[in-house]
Image: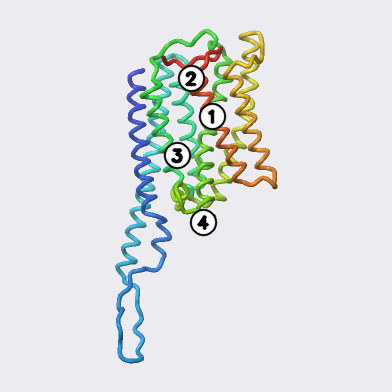
Amino acid sequence: MSALSDQLVSFAILAYLVAMISHAVEYALGNARTRAAAPARELVGAGVGAPGEVVAKVPAAGGTAAAERTAARARLAGRIAVGATAVAALLHLGALVTRGLAADRMPWGNMYEFVLTVSFIATAGWLAVLWKRPPLRRLGLFLTLVMVLLVATAELVLYTPIVPLVPALNSYWFVVHVSTIVFSSGVFLLGVVPAVAYLMRAGWEQGRRSFPYTLARRMPAAAALERLTFVLHAFSFPIFTFAVIAGAIWAEAAWGRPWGWDPKETWAFISWVVYAGYLHARATPSVKRNVATWLAVLGFLTVLMNLFGVNIFFEGLHSYAGID
């Protein structure tokens, strides 16, 4: 089962890569509908007629046909991208299930397993968003790019052979606390993608034509991206809050104190404050949306610090990285 899990992760990375390339093809072809519907720019019949005669330029039929072919290719690439993402999600899920069966526990015992699970939650959430809001499909380019980098990093850098849980984790609170942390972190991961895309798209709509704003010229409208960012964070924050509270209850049962400012506890508190600040700023009319969105991005940076920085560089009661 362990070997099968490893193979499924490798296949999932390949599927994410196919999805990313397909999204890139669709993105490069531009707005398929607009290009198919726009008048052809290629004109024929230019010339000078008899004195006083106006010779009109007429659209070439070939221009419209070429635009339609481009639109068809873009749609096909988009469908392939979504299909490849769904296949990647199934392979990803299979890797987690087989890893759990091989370990005879939930697959959340170290950084490798945690990153795999968080990235799967983000992918599953993205497919749910895409099912409800198909026009957001082009955001998939950035989402699949993140998945390729994250899952590949887990496989190549964070990989850890299956080992039993450390005694501190051998509790039913392991499922309660870690499952909610994993789920909320996965939604936060998904939420930071439209947040970054919004900041770039908003700059593009304001007339900025330098890098990185040019990357967003074919992204969905800034308002739609900002709304998705808010919805995802508003959904995840209460779950994250419950996870922190459950962790404090577990700490009381395991170590005799609910809070001890352990490095991971400290950074979890920092993340909670930043995300609470984002939601408060988002609900305050006087705060600009881009300022509030930067808080959402900052919040995810604190999550990354808690996951990677604390596990690798700090020692504490939560040191379960599982890597050397």
Give the residue number, with chain letter if any, for mark 1.
185
Q: Measure how far apart labels 4 and 3 are at the Cα level.
A: 25 Å
Residue 76 in the figure: left or right of residue 321: left
Answer few, some or many: residues within 10 Å of disc 4's Cα (few below 14, many 20 plus, some between 14 and 19): few
Q: Which mark is residue 207?
A: 4
Residue 112 in the figure: left or right of residue 291: left
Q: Measure how far apart labels 2 and 1 are at the Cα level.
A: 13 Å
Give the residue number, with chain letter if any, for mark 3.
143
Residue 246 position within the rendered picture, expressed as x and y whole percent measured from the top left: 63, 20
Q: Earlier in the sequence, mark 4 or mark 2?
A: 2
Q: Is the C-beta separation of discs 1 and 3 under 8 Å?
A: no
Q: SS class of the residue under badge 1?
A: helix
Give the residue number, with chain letter if any, for mark 2.
108
Q: Earlier in the sequence, mark 1 or mark 3?
A: 3
Q: Measure how far apart labels 4 and 2 are at the Cα level.
A: 45 Å
Q: Is the C-beta separation of discs 4 and 3 under 8 Å?
A: no
The nearer-to-camera label among 3 and 2 is 3
Task: Please state which amino acid type lies under the numbered disc 3.
Answer: Leu
Front residue of 144/156: it is 156
